């Protein structure tokens, strides 16, 4: 359903719901409000709202291919994405950095000016966690994932437009994407949205299945919450090896193990 101006009500309503989930989670996690009087069930439900970020990735997986298809050039698409992200990100990062540096807070404590500048510039371009570094705004890793997805989608579209029959280029693209997903597993959450875009006609023909969207949302949150399976040693080795290739860690952190519960995907 779209408004007269082309405003997609379901998609933007879903975005608003995801944003509300994340906001409520951070309010609860920061102990701005306490839920002890409501008991453990309420805390369990509200702590599950942290996964609204992954739901945002699913939305991007659907809307970004549409946006790409509408743009006449790949450059125009990337420029629009750049403006959309950095017009908000740069002012927010600058304000947080100035406040933290002025009061010698958090990661800026006793940090040399040049080191602080380097940290700031790395965060401006959303390099952590792709490269070793400290996140000034802890949630900015999600913007890094988004920007990488924009770039990956743009590269694939460029390959398909220039040479639709080039299997070698598509294989190289798929191998690079696979390596990134192994190193940063949360990137896999873009895939459901991409699949909906790819098979939109099938979903349109099976609209009755979409009537249970509220139930499917609850199932997603609970299944993701209860998914506490242990990573196999092979998975740990593969992820550490891929991270070593993509973002070599400092020597002192080379021996650190990845979080064992699969739910705590390293972001």
Image (tube, helix red, strand yellow):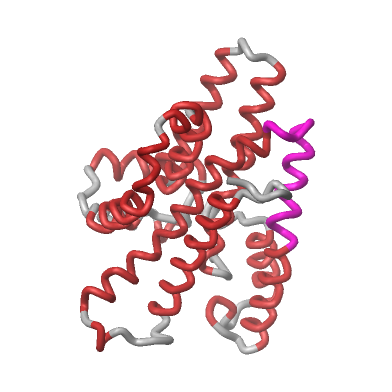
Residue 16: x and y in percent read 54, 62
**Residue drawn 34% across and 47% down?**
212
> Which of the 4 quarters of the picture holds residue 95?
bottom right
> Which of the 4 quarters of the picture holds residue 89?
bottom right
**Magenta segment, which residues?**
69-87
Residue 129 falls within the magenta-colored stretch:
no
- Residue 205, relative to residue 83: is it above or below? above
In this picture, residue 79 sits left or right of residue 246: right
**Residue drawn 56% across and 69% down?**
137
- Residue 141, relative to residue 57: is it above or below? below
Query: In this orientation, does residue 13 appear?
Result: yes
Q: Nearer the viewer, residue 139 or 119?
A: 139
* Magenta: main secondary structure: helix
Extreme residue toward the top, this view: 165
**Residue drawn 56% across and 20% down?**
170
Query: In this orientation, does residue 175 appear?
Result: no
Residue 98: x and y in percent read 69, 80
């Amino acid at each position: 359903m779209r408004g007269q101006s082309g405003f997609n009500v379901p998609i933007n309503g879903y975005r608003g719901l995801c944003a509300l989930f994340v906001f409520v989670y951070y309010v609860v996690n920061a102990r701005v409000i306490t839920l002890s009087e409501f008991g453990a069930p309420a805390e369990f439900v509200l702590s599950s709202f942290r996964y609204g970020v992954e739901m945002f990735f699913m939305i991007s997986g659907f809307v970004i291919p549409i946006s790409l298809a509408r743009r006449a050039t790949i450059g125009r698409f990337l420029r629009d994405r750049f403006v959309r992200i950095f017009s908000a990100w740069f002012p927010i990062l600058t304000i947080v950095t100035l406040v933290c540096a002025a009061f010698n807070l958090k990661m800026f404590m006793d940090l040399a000016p040049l080191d602080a500048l380097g940290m700031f510039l790395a965060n401006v371009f959303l390099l952590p966690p792709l490269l070793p570094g400290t996140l000034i705004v802890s949630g900015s890793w999600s913007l890094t994932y988004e920007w990488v997805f924009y770039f990956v989608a743009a590269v694939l579209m460029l390959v398909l437009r220039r040479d639709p029959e080039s299997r070698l280029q598509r294989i190289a693209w798929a191998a690079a994407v696979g390596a990134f997903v192994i190193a940063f597993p949360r990137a896999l959450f873009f895939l459901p949205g991409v699949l909906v875009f790819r098979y939109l006609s099938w979903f349109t023909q099976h609209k009755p299945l979409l009537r249970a969207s509220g139930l499917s949302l609850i199932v997603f949150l609970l299944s993701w919450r209860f998914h506490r399976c242990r990573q196999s040693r092979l998975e740990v080795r593969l992820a550490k090896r891929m991270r070593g290739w993509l973002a070599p860690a400092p020597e002192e952190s080379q021996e650190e193990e990845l979080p064992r519960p699969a739910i705590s995907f390293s972001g």
